[in-house]
Image (spheres, rainbow, N blue to C red):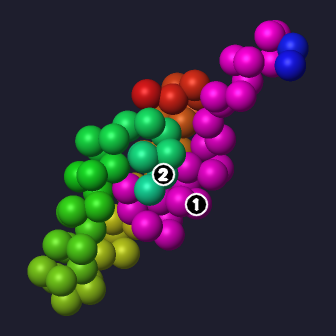
Amino acid sequence: MDSALLPFLDMKSPGTAAVLSALIPGLGQLYNGTFWRGIVWLVLTPGLWIGTGGLLGWICHVVSAWTAHSYAKKHPTGG
């Protein structure tokens, strides 16, 4: 394998991070390598779904996807 390609193997895709977090908030953060952010989203989202009867749970999906996308864009090689 060409050593010039090695930095590109660890590149994170903002689109993939956003889709993962839109499906399961926190998964995109874990993909980005930000473990604790992912755990916070994984705990926070079910709490809001249950605590508000589903009213605010969907907001976590949108915000989590946006933050995962933004982080992957600013830090393409991960956490």
Magenta span contains residue 13: yes
Q: Identity of the amino acid at label 1?
A: Val
Q: Is residue 62 magenta?
A: no
Q: Residues within 10 Å of mark 1 (few under 14, many from 20)?
A: many
Q: Position of residue 3 (x, y in %)?
A: 80, 10
The answer to whether residue 35 shows anywhere in this view is: yes
Q: Which residues are magenta?
A: 3-26
Give the residue at x 48% y 51%.
28
19 up-or-down from 16: above or below: below
Numbered label attached to residue 19: 1
Figure disc tally: 2
Residue 28 numbered tag: 2
Main secondary-structure element of the magenta-colored stretch: helix
Say if mark 1 contacts mark 2, CB within 8 Å. Answer: yes
Residues at marks 1 and 2, CA–CA distance in whole angstroms: 7 Å
Residue drawn 81% across and 18% down?
Answer: 5
User: For the residue marked with disc 2, what is the amino acid?
Assistant: Gly
For residue 53, side relative to residue 63 (left or right): left
Q: Nearer the viewer, residue 67 or 23?
A: 23
The furthest residue to the top: 4
Q: Position of residue 54 (x, y in %)?
A: 26, 86
Which quadrant would the C terminus be assigned to in this image?
top left
Q: Residue at x 29, y 75 (%)?
A: 57
Locate the N terminus by quadrant.
top right
Which percent across, then down, holds residue 24? 43, 67
Of labels 1 and 2, earlier in sequence is 1
SS type, badge 1 = helix
Residue at far left of view: 51
Q: Can residue 62 be spotted in the picture? A: no
